Amino acid sequence: MKKILVLGGTGFVGRHVCEKLTQLQWRVTVPTRQESNARNIQMLPSLDVFEANVHDEAVLTRLVAGHDAVVNLIAILHGTKTAFDKVHVELPQKLARACAATGVRRVVHVSALGADMRNPDIAPSMYLRSKGHGEVALHHAALDLTVLRPSVMFGADDKFLNVFAHLQKIFPVVPLAASHALFQPVWVEDVASAIVHCLKDEHLHATADQTFDACGPGIFTLRQLVEMAGRLSGINQGRGRPVIALPAALGRLQARLMEFAPGEPLMSRDNLASMTQPNIASGNLPGLQAMGITPAALEAVAPAYLGPGSGGWGLRSNLTLKRKSAGRS
Ligand SMILES: NC(=O)c1ccc[n+]([C@@H]2O[C@H](COP(=O)([O-])OP(=O)(O)OC[C@H]3O[C@@H](n4cnc5c(N)ncnc54)[C@H](OP(=O)(O)O)[C@@H]3O)[C@@H](O)[C@H]2O)c1
């Protein structure tokens, strides 16, 4: 039985990873800022949740000690440069030192498509630049490191297609910035399977290339994704709402206004900056197929959770939806 520390185990990807690791009967530790954030995983067998401040290096070092491997899924999508650097750069630096201090060498780190560890500063957004610098920090350490770079992820409990569908339930039209931005969406279950594969495969870290693009089989514009979410969720008798592409200046204004809205913004100017770069496989790195995973098509999975009567917003249990999703487990 392996012991795995999952940083960010309470999040969208983390919940799926924890489920798979506990199915293997491995021991899983998940620190969280707030125990209530762990309600979707704390019932899993052989999993321990602790409230802990992972940014405190002494705390992080104590957490890492005694584990066979660490999975790092902690990230933010919105914030200032200081906030991005704290979470995406300084935390990986602390993790590298914690691993060195405790003798833990195996780390699986989830970054993002578009991050560039060879030249982090050329990326178009604070998010992607900080993700690139985070990769550099881990690569400089003496670790057995695997980095996964996913495109946007979909799944029953996503905040992506579910949000597009929900917006169309509320508004008669969708004014959309960056409507031509390209994505290659990947199923969260496939990314979780890849992470587990990395932890299972003792020989993977001995291979030359340790960075993988994690993408699905199809490339879509943002407009196509919004329209598909509307259609699949049966809104407007299955036609979805009309999508109005905003010119760049209006798109920036919309994002700026959204940044002032209470709670997590739907879109920020930094998100728009990220979307100036196609969010599709680089062509230079191996993909999930190199791990023996055939990525599921969005069209095969999304109808099961967006379809009329499905509940939307990830309200149904993951397990029910997974059974419905294209007959895959
Ligand atoms: N979702 C996507 O479409 C997508 C696309 C590309 C790349 N990724 C990458 O995939 C990884 C996992 O993403 P996800 O969608 O699962 O993220 P998520 O659902 O937002 O979860 C993020 C996790 O990080 C923790 N966290 C957030 N802010 C934190 C902070 N300031 N300090 C400490 N912990 C913090 C949260 O834990 P607590 O709240 O329990 O503390 C949560 O478990 C990330 O690296 C992300 O950048 C995601």
Image: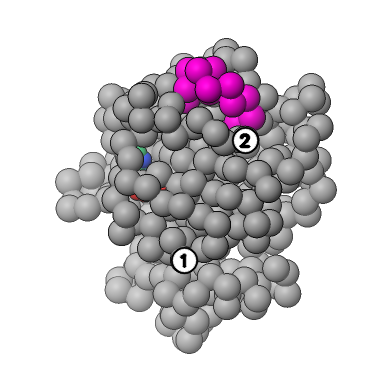
**Nearer the observer, 22 or 192:** 22
The residues colored magenta run 95-109
**Nearer the observer, 111 or 129:** 111
Q: Residue at x 17, y 46 (%)?
A: 260
Q: Is residue 221 visible?
A: no
Where 291 falls versus 59 (above or below)? below
Q: Residue at x 60, y 43 (%)?
A: 3
> What colouring method underlies this structural image?
one colour
- Mark 1–mark 2 Cα distance, whole angstroms, equals 22 Å
Asked which secondary structure carries label 2, the reply is loop
Q: Is residue 326 visible?
A: yes
Question: Disc number at residue 43?
Answer: 1
The image position of residue 215, as x and y in percent, is 66, 46
Q: Residue at x 68, y 56 (%)?
A: 24
Q: Does 53 appear in magenta?
A: no
The image position of residue 138, as x and y in percent, is 55, 21
The CB of the residue at mark 2 lies under 8 Å from ligand 1 = no
Q: Does 97 appear in magenta?
A: yes
Name the image quarter holding the C terminus: bottom right
List the residue tagged with mark 2.
Answer: 68
